[in-house]
Image (cartoon, helix red, strand yellow):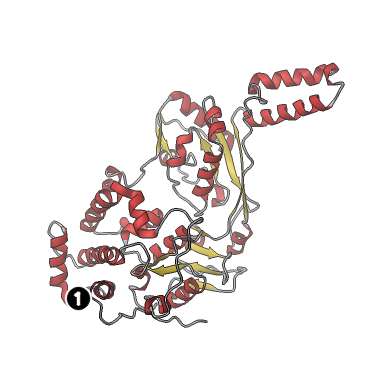
């Protein structure tokens, strides 16, 4: 992983903690949540306060995520909102934490000036020993406070102020006044500077979970379904259609029926042929590394020459995407690529304006793993696991490509590949013309409905 770390592709944007004051605040919060402390003189934390160095020290990388279903967090600075979430168990967790920090930025800034803020992403499920329990997770509520209970004290002071103002005899209640003065010494004037953190509640609709080998749960769609990336877990689930990764036709059917995907080659506002050419390069490098082929300096010219040398031995995915590119650039016969073809999922992307765009693109990345760029952008855990298995020559190519071509303009690359970041408020595209065969049947040909 050295190449990735050196190029900022792994553990990037983590927050360094080295100040003795911050370390002490972290330890107070860690002790309050887990009963543990760290003796490290410095370490890095992600958006949730998890530190890989502390995880190594404690021998437990789930020390802030017991049972993997109620993630705890420690906030030392609002700068954590730009950090990644490591060891994620649910696809929704980072977004919830980031929104919580954004919504409470001013209050968190004031609180973290003196103390750490600790809390938990709470739901009504405390273990996920069976897949059915995943479906009981609907609401995620964030409860947070400082280690010195500033928020709880502020709430108590606000309640006593209300009581004081409502009771005409409160001026004679020495106990109430003394309690208010005592709390005010800890919290300050909460009427002018409120520090009560919102009790935020988030809905978890469709999501990915790392549990049970990786499950994509689509329950808030017209035709609910679950896709398993590993072996289908045993046990009941309140969804009739459970699909294995080894059933691409069924996956394609549900993606199409629910209006979740579109063709890359015909996506409006993008150069689909350019995107497919890049995917072809990624597939070519993968095949050449497997066959121990000489790739020279891995320049565009070297890769073209390599493709010529490999000829008929080129992977099926490469040849199918090449046929699509030829059709787009030169016309001719439309290449029909069905869902049984290994290139099928490389031809798709999520519908840009759909609220589950990122989730769908994450699943497509797993279904088209030779597109390492999409895997890196959409599913870093799967990318790192795959990267560890690759030949050294492919590791070098991937690390250099991502550093040179993606990191230089991450927002632009995501816009070009997946469409705008906004999922609402955009004018919908015009309806397809009836004489446009691709808009009628898509790049995969007609898909038989269930």
Q: Left or right: 62 with respect to 172?
A: left
How many circles with numbers are drawn on the protein? 1
Q: Left or right: 208 with respect to 168?
A: left
Instruction: Give the x, y percent position of residue 233.
Output: 53, 67
Instruction: Decide: is 449 above or below 45.
Output: below
| Point 66% across, 26% down: residue | 190
Where residue 269 sits, quadrant-wise, is bottom left
Pick the front one: 181 or 50: 181
Q: Which residue is mark 1?
A: 313
Where residue 118 sits, quadrant-wise, is top right
Pointer 1: residues within 10 angstroms few (<14), some, or many (20+)? few
Instruction: Give the x, y percent position of residue 13.
Output: 38, 41
Instruction: Give the x, y percent position of residue 95.
Output: 50, 49
Q: Left or right: 103 with respect to 23?
A: right
Instruction: Give the x, y percent position of residue 214.
Output: 47, 62
Dot 1: what SS? helix
Q: Left or right: 172 with respect to 133?
A: right
Pick the front one: 271 or 131: 271
Q: Is residue 446 visible?
A: yes
User: Which residue in the rendered view is the most extreme toward the right?
Assistant: 169
Instruction: Decide: is 231 above or below 83.
Output: below
| Point 22% across, 55% down: residue | 397
Q: Is residue 58 visible?
A: no
Pick the front one: 163 or 125: 163
């Amino acid at each position: 992983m050295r190449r990735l770390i050196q190029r900022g592709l792994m553990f990037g944007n983590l927050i360094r903690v080295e100040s003795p004051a911050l370390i002490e605040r972290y330890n107070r919060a860690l002790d309050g949540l887990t009963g543990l402390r760290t003796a490290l003189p410095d370490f890095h934390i992600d958006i949730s306060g998890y530190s890989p160095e502390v995880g190594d020290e404690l021998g437990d990388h789930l020390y802030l995520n017991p049972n993997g279903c109620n993630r705890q967090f420690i906030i030392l600075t609002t700068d954590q909102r730009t950090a990644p979430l490591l060891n994620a168990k649910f696809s929704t967790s980072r977004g919830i934490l980031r929104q919580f920090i954004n919504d409470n930025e001013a209050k968190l800034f004031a609180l973290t000036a003196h103390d750490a803020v600790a809390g938990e992403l709470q739901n009504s499920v405390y273990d996920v020993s069976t897949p059915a329990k995943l479906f009981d997770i609907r609401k995620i509520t964030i409860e947070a406070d400082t280690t010195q209970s500033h928020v709880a004290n502020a709430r108590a002071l606000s309640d006593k102020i209300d009581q004081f103002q409502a009771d005409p005899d409160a001026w004679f209640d020495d106990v109430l006044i003394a309690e208010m003065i005592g709390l005010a010494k800890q919290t300050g004037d909460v009427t002018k500077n409120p520090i009560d953190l919102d009790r935020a509640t988030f809905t978890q609709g469709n999501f990915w979970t790392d549990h049970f080998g990786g499950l994509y749960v689509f329950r808030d769609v017209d035709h609910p379904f679950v896709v398993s990336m590993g072996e289908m877990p045993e046990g009941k689930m309140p969804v009739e259609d459970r699909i294995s990764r080894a059933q691409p036709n069924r996956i394609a059917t549900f993606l199409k029926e629910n209006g979740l995907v579109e063709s890359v080659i015909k996506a409006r506002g993008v150069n689909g042929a350019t995107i497919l050419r890049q995917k072809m390069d990624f597939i070519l490098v993968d095949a050449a590394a497997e066959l121990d082929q000489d790739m020279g300096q891995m320049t565009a010219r070297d890769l073209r020459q390599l493709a010529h040398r490999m000829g008929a031995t080129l992977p099926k995915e490469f040849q199918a995407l090449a046929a699509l590119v030829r059709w787009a650039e030169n016309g001719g016969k439309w290449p029909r690529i069905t869902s049984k073809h290994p290139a099928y999922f490389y031809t798709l992307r999520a519908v840009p304006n759909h609220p589950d765009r990122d989730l769908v693109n994450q699943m497509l990345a797993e279904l088209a793993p030779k597109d390492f760029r999409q895997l890196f952008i959409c599913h870093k855990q799967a990318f790192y696991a795959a990267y560890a298995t690759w030949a050294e020559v492919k590791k070098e190519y991937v690390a250099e490509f991502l550093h040179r071509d993606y990191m230089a303009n991450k927002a632009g690359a995501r816009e070009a590949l997946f469409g705008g970041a906004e999922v609402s408020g955009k004018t919908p595209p015009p309806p397809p013309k009836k004489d446009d065969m691709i808009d009628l049947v898509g790049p995969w040909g007609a898909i038989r409905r269930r």
